[in-house]
Image (cartoon, grey):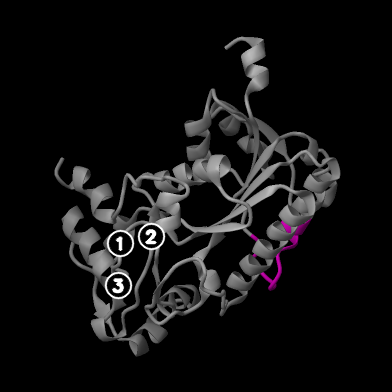
Amino acid sequence: MSPTAAARRPSLLIVGCGDVGLRVLRLLRGRWRVYALTSTPARRAVLRAAGAVPLVGDLDDAATLGRLGALADAVLHLAPPPPTGDTDPRTARLLRALARAGRVRRLVYASTTGVYGDCGGARFDETRPVRPATDRARRRVDAEARVRWFGRASGAVVSVLRIPGIYALDRDGGDPRERVRRGVPVLVDADDVYTNHIHADDLARACVAALCRGAPQRVYHVSDDSQRRMGEHFDAVADLAGLPRPPRITRDEARARLSPMQLSFLGESRRLVNVRLKRELRVRLRYPTVDDALRPRASA
């Protein structure tokens, strides 16, 4: 690439460049100049090898974020909030740093569908009001409000991606077969909840689409097409992987056997409409259901 062409490349800052961020880097390599913020100096070599310019900074330390605002035209914010509290001071510090230079014209924030709380299995689109039931979800609602305010104040185009459970066979901790192999139980039909998922590669493609086509102040469900209860989902994983189906237990038994974190996911049921993802962002899912991700391996 000539120096002139390189200079014309759009620039992006990825904040929180873990598994999904690395997948985004693979999609953008050679087409964008990408900076990646990490709080772990040892990750610089990994980020550099993936095609990013690594930057060391910590969202818990505002003094390390001073130069971020002048680096890039667009920001992809993938970093999680802190593990405690009901607000997200990490996002607050990031936005203050970005506002100093006034360069950022587009920001995409990766949130969670947990902001809706329990919806009793209802099927709905992005117009449904948020109703967070946990501090974890309240932190995300706070972050969403902060990034949208940043967009209104700065004139930047801000898009919010609400994301359910992320999986991929090559994602550390995200291979659904591992849960089945461990024999983690699911609820009996009478107590079961609807669950939503997205393949990590489809999520990365949605992030890129939002950076290019996301509308101002717009929320998008980044979810696949499945409309299954959790038990059905993991039964399908087991069948396609040639594994025993997970045991079924009642909700009362789950309270005695599962961790509070596991229980929190069993207490919320919803079905997401993903029309905006397809029509507005023009994302064509490569993995509409988990079956599409598992079938090639199951038949190999």
Q: Is residue 73 left or right of residue 46?
A: right
What's the mark number on residue 229?
Answer: 3
Q: Give me the residue at 56% from left, 47% from top.
A: 214
Residue 189 lies in the magenta-colored region: no
Residue type for callout 2:
His
Disc with the residue nearer the chain's start (1 vs 2): 2
Cα–Cα gap, marks 1 and 2? 8 Å
Q: Looking at this view, is 97 or 161 the one in front? A: 161
What's the magenta bit mostly, secondary-structure-wise?
loop
Residue 88 lies in the magenta-colored region: yes
Residue type for callout 3:
Arg
Cα–Cα gap, marks 2 and 3? 11 Å
Q: Is residue 268 left or right of residue 134?
A: left
Question: Can you identify the residue that label 1 sits on?
Answer: 226
Q: From the top left corner, tell me how far across and down residue 197 is, in percent.
A: 38, 60
Q: From the top left corner, tell me how far across and down residue 138 is, in percent.
A: 63, 73
Please provide the residue range marked out in magenta. 81-92
What's the mark number on residue 94?
Answer: none
* Occupied quadrant, residue 224: bottom left
Residue closest to the far top = 2
Q: Is residue 135 above or below residue 204?
A: below
What's the mark number on residue 197?
Answer: 2
**Front position among marks 3 and 1:** 1
The answer to whether residue 90 shows anywhere in this view is: no
Q: Is residue 135 above or below residue 150?
A: below
The answer to whether residue 66 shows anywhere in this view is: yes
Q: Quadrant of the C terminus?
A: top left
